[in-house]
Amino acid sequence: MSGLTTLATLQGFRVSEVAAGVRPFWEAAAAESGVPLAFSDLELWHTIGLGPASTLCAIHDGQEKLVGGFAVQRWPSSALPGHCILRLERLGESIPEGAEPATVGAVLALARRTSRVLRVVAELHDRDAARRDRIAGALRAAAFYRKDQVRMYERTLAIELQRGDRALLDSFSARARREIRRAERFPLSVITIEDDAFVPQLEEILWETFARTGGRTPAQPWTRLVAAARETPDRLRIFGVMLTEAGTARLVSFALVLRHGTFAVYHTAGSTRLADRRIPLAYPAIWALMRWARDTGATWFDFGGLTGGTSESEDDPLGGISEFKRNFGGEQLVIGEDWQFDAAPLRQRLVQAAGRVLALAGD
């Protein structure tokens, strides 16, 4: 089965567009070949509501061996109706060394074949700085420019996972180890959430969590996420912490983890506040999801965005969350950078000008 249309051939690599009808075959072939596709490269990402429709691209070497791949998402432009933005999310480890120019050439070829493309955005997400630099070099050579800000996050904590429970626990701070042990003294239990009956509680806890930081609660397709947790437990898990009192159990915290290529990502989490006591509600869920990630084969854990603040920082509403993450040790590093190509420069300048006008009007 083929279903491939060549987009670019450079330096011994061929990059092809995968036809929609055979995409499941090529996703399975990538898994069998050890290609570390990100979760966001899979059709499942769109199916469960985490992103828009996308096109899968396969990379073959000179011996016609499948050696890499990536997806190009099509986001509708909110600024210019009828236009779209092509986005490559978590671009990095699934691009083999030497295939960077062919990858960028294929993306631009796809942009030329897609009607009304406003811009192309490549979101690099890779802890390997050398690989990130190679991809950035190919983007720069093709007239992409680096954006001042990233859409997701620039910095994270990377925690090595492939070690036993004791070694992993010992790598945490003394406070994290203490809180995990302290949680064991309370009537708390960790479950995997696979029942739609928990959806209202997940929504309520997430709203409460963001309300504490003054942030806007992001919409989550909880029903589809719970279904995916049932059907693809090697890619997605929702861990819930239950508190049992007077014979009644209730959900008091949760953490959603996604498995990408060689790593797992802390996607979102939330916890309630108990009025009469302080119980470490979040620590048991994080401890469970790290062990799950390790057992699925992930080599490291990406703790999501990280700021420099603490719980005492008045100018950093996420400081307390970042302080909580740092309790788990790991390596603080730069992981993300965004690059943009203006496929329709005149229309892009009109969009930017309109944005400035609206910003001034808002002031």
Image (spheres, rainbow, N blue to C red):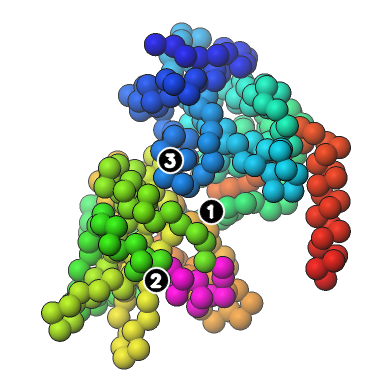
Identity, as a three-letter code, of the amino acid under mark 1: Leu
Above or below: residue 224 compared with residue 36: below
Question: What residue span does the magenta drawing correspond to?
Answer: 206-216
Q: Do the residues labelled 3 and 2 touch (CB within 8 Å)?
A: no
Q: Which quadrant, please, contains the N terminus?
A: top left
Where is mark 1, residue-wise? 333
Q: Do the residues labelled 1 and 2 touch (CB within 8 Å)?
A: no
Towards the viewer: 123 or 323: 123
Label 1: how many Cα within 10 Å (few below 14, some 14–19, many 20+): some
Question: Is residue 202 visible to us here?
Answer: yes
Q: Do the residues labelled 3 and 1 touch (CB within 8 Å)?
A: no
Where is mark 2, residue-wise? 205
Which image quadrant is residue 146 in? Answer: top right
Identity, as a three-letter code, of the amino acid under mark 3: Thr
Q: Which quadrant, please, contains the C terminus?
A: bottom right
Task: Determine the residue positioned at 50% across, 59% down.
Answer: 219
Secondary structure beneath disc 3?
Answer: helix
Query: Magenta stretch: residue 274 in it?
Result: no
Q: Which of marks 3 and 1 is nearer the N terminus?
A: 3
Front disc: 1 or 2? 2
Q: Residue 174 location in percent, x, y?
A: 33, 72
